[in-house]
Image (tube, grey):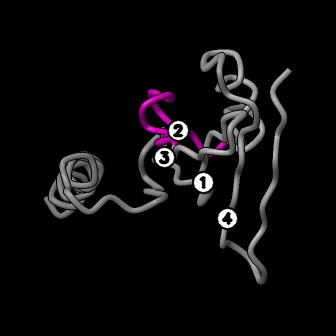
Amino acid sequence: MYERAALAIFLAGMVLVPAAGLVSTHRPAEFSWQMFSIATDGWEYEIEHANGQREPVEPDEWVATMRLGHRLADLLPPHLCEELSPAAVVVTSTTLGEEPTSARVPCP
């Protein structure tokens, strides 16, 4: 009898905990029980036009689902250069780590 109750509680937890994480308004960067974690890469992206004007880019507009296995800072700038033809440079910056980091990716 206790085995069935323990199994029922375990299975309910296996279903309810991930379901709560999916519908929660505050979603953690990694939700360990989910197969596909929500990833926040901590980088900011800007397009710099030839005239020097900068325009922020929101990664959510260009990426359907960010996953931890992909390093967006390496993949997104070349794609933005290709899609946004008047862009001259893609500027990436982050405040993660001990010191702020910034990189400029020139568009071909």
Q: Residues within 10 Å of mark 1 (few under 14, many from 20)?
A: some
**What residue type is disc 3 on?**
Ser
Residue nearest the observer in this picture, 83 or 24: 83
Q: Secondary structure at mark 3?
A: loop
Residue 99 in percent (x, y) is at 78, 80
Q: CB of mark 4 within 8 Å of CB of mark 2?
A: no
Q: Does the magenta portion include 4? A: no
Q: Nearer the viewer, mark 2 or mark 3?
A: 2
Spatial separation of the CA atoms under disc 3 and disc 4: 21 Å
Residue 16 in percent (x, y) is at 20, 51
Question: What secondary structure is the magenta-colored segment mainly?
Answer: loop
Q: Residues within 10 Å of mark 3 (few under 14, many from 20)?
A: some
Q: CB of mark 1 within 8 Å of CB of mark 2?
A: yes
Q: Which residues are magenta?
A: 57-69
Q: Does the magenta portion include 60? A: yes
Q: First in sequence, mark 2 or 3: give its number.
A: 3
Residue ID for mark 3: 37
